[in-house]
Amino acid sequence: MVAYIARRLATGLVLAVLVTLITFLLLSTSFDRVVAAVLGPAATPALIGPTKERMGLDRPVLVQYLDWLGHTVRGDFGTSYFTSEDVVHAVTGRLGVTLSIILIALVISVVVSVALGVLSAARGGVADRVAQGLSLVGHLVPGLLIAIGLVFALAINLQLLPATGYTPLAEDPGRWAATIAIPVIVLVVSGIANMTAQIRGSMIDELRKDYVRTLRSRGIPTRSIVYRHALRNAAGPALTVLSLEFLQMFGAALIIENVFALPGFGSYAFNASIQGDVPIIMGVTVFSVLMVVSLNLVADLVNGWLNPKARIH
């Protein structure tokens, strides 16, 4: 197991290097525009050249990348070209906002999806119709449309929640909960739609297998069969969907944060890419790759713990 984790981490580091190298090469094609944006209205051909040299952007691209990589390995991600803010501080601060929304939405989605998926597969009837109806609505109705509808209903008409803005948790927990409520609901609708269908399908497959019929013939209670055996074996595919759903929510955060004016990771990365803020873009890329690698590793380890057949040595 230790060797497997070491291999996965090594693979993740190689992937991070490749992705950041490709990103840096793509960014290098627009260094002149970046310098012009930094200079602002004062940008002239006479100033762009010296400024580019002062920023070190006139050197060979590979030399610049290796210099950035060397500093990054030592924990120095640089500072923003436009705000002079430390990259690590800027990225982690906004990442906390995004993760607070995603993790809450993910927990709610998992609880509801497991309950609906298991009930739908084991009992059918009303639970099955509700599960399939929610999945259909979540897949057919775009998240942006759901967000706009919730803003009109809950923020404008009923005035129960704020339409935009963000209050830090440490400043006012109640106000913080109110500001993230609608974004969380939007993500939950999509999460339930995706995960309920997967859990329902996996549970139906498991309940049709021979070992379930054998357990029933031995008089094992249905509740025990469903929750102790079938659900555990169905957890593998569900975990894969869970990790993919996390990444999907992370991508959806770009739209959600812009719609609700949240100072999160997605909106910050988008604005940095528009400005051409190279240090911020590179920092965002590193954090994103490492997060994906870590998430997949955790999913594999949990799957191995739940299902002995899937354990990796």
Image: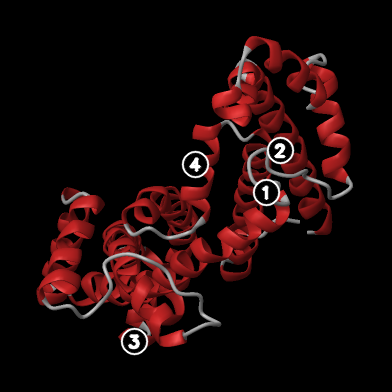
Inter-mark Cα distance, 1 to 3? 40 Å
* Marks 2 and 3, the one that precedes in the sequence: 2
Closer-to-camera residue (98/173): 173
Quadrant of the rendering where the N terminus is positioned: bottom right
Depth check, front residue: 27 or 108: 27
> Which residue was labeled with disc 1?
290
Front of the two marks 1 and 4: 4
The percent coordinates of residue 313 (x first, y second) are: 76, 56
Amino acid, disc 2: Ala
Q: Amino acid at mark 4?
A: Asn
Element on which disc 3 rests = helix
Which residue is found at the position 73% from the left and 51% from the top?
Answer: 86
**Front-lying residue, 163 or 105:** 163
Element on which disc 4 rests: helix
Q: Position of residue 222 (x, y in %)?
A: 31, 84
Residue 223 disc label: 3
**Mark found first going from the N terminus, 4 or 3:** 3
> Dot 2: what SS?
helix
- Residue identifier under label 2: 16
